[in-house]
Amino acid sequence: MTGLRRSVLAVFVGSALVLGAWPAVSARQVNAPAPAQASAGARVTELDVNGLKVLVKERPGTQTIAAGLYIRGGSRNVTATDAGIESLMLSVATEASANYPREKFRRELSRTGTVIGSGVNHDYSAFTLGCTREHFDEAWAIFADAAMHPSFDPADFDRVKGQHLLALQSQRDTPDAALEAEVERV
């Protein structure tokens, strides 16, 4: 597992390096028109951070903030031998980080009402954050640390791997789930 852990960590940290640069962003800001479906008063700002496109959509009056780190490729980056690795990697990364061991990580997320999650589809993978405006600075610190310095603790890895395997085994428990799994396989 050590080789796999190293390569997964390298891919994840390489994809997440922009998070460390976020507070230093002040360079090129280009105001882009808000999309037609955007609520009245919403403004979208496009930033270039070390060649990475960052979109910021302001929603005046809301008390929540949502953020996501999107990694191009998603499930199309995998082969039959490494299928599920992105999902597993992101799930384990949401368990703990270098500066926030599992118990502290969970305690801080609970205290601030923050949710850190992940998802994978055919086109991209996402590492996500949801929090209140009041606790954004604390939530961002945890999110950035989890993205840039996930602990990948072996106990967390084994627990999350077991959860993923159980979910895969239960795909055939209902006809709808079995049909969906077969469509995905094809």
Image (cartoon, rainbow, N blue to C red):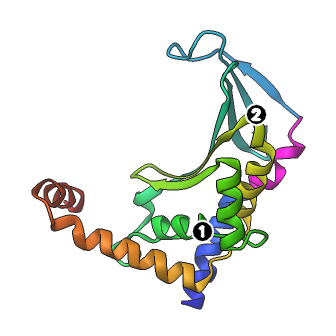
Name the residue nearer the viewer: 19 or 48: 19
Please say whether residue 125 is one of the residues in the magenta stretch. Answer: no
Name the residue nearer the viewer: 67 or 50: 67
Image quarter of the C terminus: bottom left
Query: Which residue is at 50% across, 16% downward?
Result: 37
Could you tell me what secondary structure mostly forms the magenta stretch? helix
Q: Position of residue 21 (x, y in %)?
A: 83, 50
Cα distance between the residues tagged 2 and 1: 29 Å
Q: Position of residue 147 (x, y in %)?
A: 68, 61
Name the residue nearer the viewer: 168 or 138: 138
Q: Position of residue 53 (x, y in %)?
A: 69, 39
Query: Which residue is at 55% across, 78% downward?
Result: 156
- Above or below residue 150? Residue 115 is above
Residue 150 seen from this side: no
Q: Residues within 10 Å of mark 2 (few under 14, many from 20)?
A: some
Q: Which residue is mark 2?
A: 47
Quick one: label 2 or label 1, which is nearer the N terminus? 2
Q: Helix or strand or loop: what does disc 2 sit on?
A: strand
Q: Position of residue 46 (x, y in %)?
A: 72, 29
Disc 2 residue type (three-letter): Leu
Please say whether residue 22 is one of the residues in the magenta stretch. Answer: yes
User: Does 96 sit left or right of 156 as displayed?
Assistant: right
Query: Which residue is at 66% across, 56% downward?
Result: 109
Dividing the picture into quarters, in which one does residue 168 lie?
bottom left
User: Does 41 sit left or right of 87 as displayed?
Assistant: right
Q: Helix or strand or loop: what does disc 1 sit on?
A: loop
**Range of residues picked out in magenta:** 17-26
Query: Which residue is at 68% across, 75% downward?
Result: 151
The residue lying furthest to the bottom in this view is 2
Q: Nearer the viewer, mark 2 or mark 1?
A: 1
Q: Which residue is mark 1?
A: 95
Disc 1 residue type (three-letter): Glu
